[in-house]
Amino acid sequence: MKKKHFSVLVILLLLTGCSNQLDDVNWKFWEYFTNDTAEEVVEETPIEEEPVEEEEQPEESPQPEAPPETIENQYVLEEPFFTVLNEEKVIENTENLLVLVNKNQSLPADYVPSDLTIPDVPFSFEGDYEKKYLREAAARALEELFAAAEAENVEIFAVSGYRSYETQYGIYNTYLKKWGEEKTNAVSAIPGHSEHQTGLAMDISSRSAALDLTEEFGETPEGKWVKEHASEHGFIIRYPQDGEVITGYQYEPWHLRYVGKEVAAYMDEHDLTLEEFFDRAIKQ
């Protein structure tokens, strides 16, 4: 290729004549044809870079959803044991053994438990009166409680159990005339709002408390024993000390309410009133 270029140059010199001086020749141009190291200029085509494939990342395993937050020590309770109210806050499922009767919700005026019976325990009075009666489950549990007390030489007496709406009406109005509304409402229930009408409550006492229903009973050996062992037989002290702000009633160490052994043990362990228990209970 370079020889062909040289021949072309010679021909050009001859055609232009010998009169032109050799010094006019562009020797740099000549070097282009004579330099063995000269390389042909080749326009380089840019090489396209192959795209770098991104390394596939392993798919993240789906994380399980966090469980909903729950109140500590909730109690799972079957739905039939929750109290059902109508629009007037009158209880509809009256036979419920965990029925919640208080100042905000009441029993129907004509409600009488269907399974009332007299427990085989010592009473503080003679004769056949309605206040000797309890519902079947509560009566059997009370017999167990009294038998356990007797086995430990603790003498207690049953004083007042079931109470009809009419009886509560008479008692409430007697107190109302004697003490006035404020004091009466602290110690006695408005008719329909008394736990005694459920047939699940029994007031108890002892000789050391003169068989009376007084706060002093809680300080007697018998009262202390009952407080310690009531839950073992399915009972709670319904109106505990310092519980008035929740229950609406003054301390009544004599007032036992049947709720069953499992619920009673739970309430005793966590020091709850029945109202507080239902605040923690969730439906199964």
Image (cartoon, grey):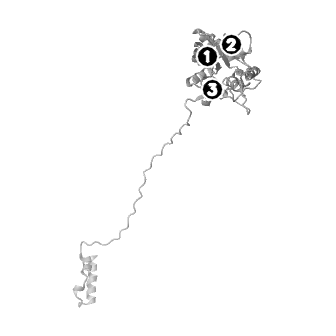
The secondary structure type at the circle numbered 1 is helix
Amino acid type of the residue that numbered disc 2 sits on in the rendered structure: Pro
Image quadrant in which you'd find residue 133: top right
Q: Residue at x 26, y 88 (%)?
A: 14
Label 2, residues with CA under 10 Å away: few <14, some 14-19, many ≥20: many
Q: Nearer the viewer, residue 80 or 184?
A: 184
Residue 187 vertical position relative to residue 121 in the rendered view, above or below: below
Q: x and y percent of residue 95 in the render?
A: 71, 23
Residue at which label 1 appears? 216
Disc 3 packing (10 Å; few <14; some 14–19; many ≥20) = some
Q: What amino acid is labelled 1 in the image?
A: Glu
Mark 2 element type: loop
Quote the CA–CA distance across marks 2 and 3. 30 Å
Which quadrant holds residue 186?
A: top right
Where residue 269 sits in the image (x, y, percent)?
55, 23
Q: Nearer the viewer, residue 54 or 264?
A: 264
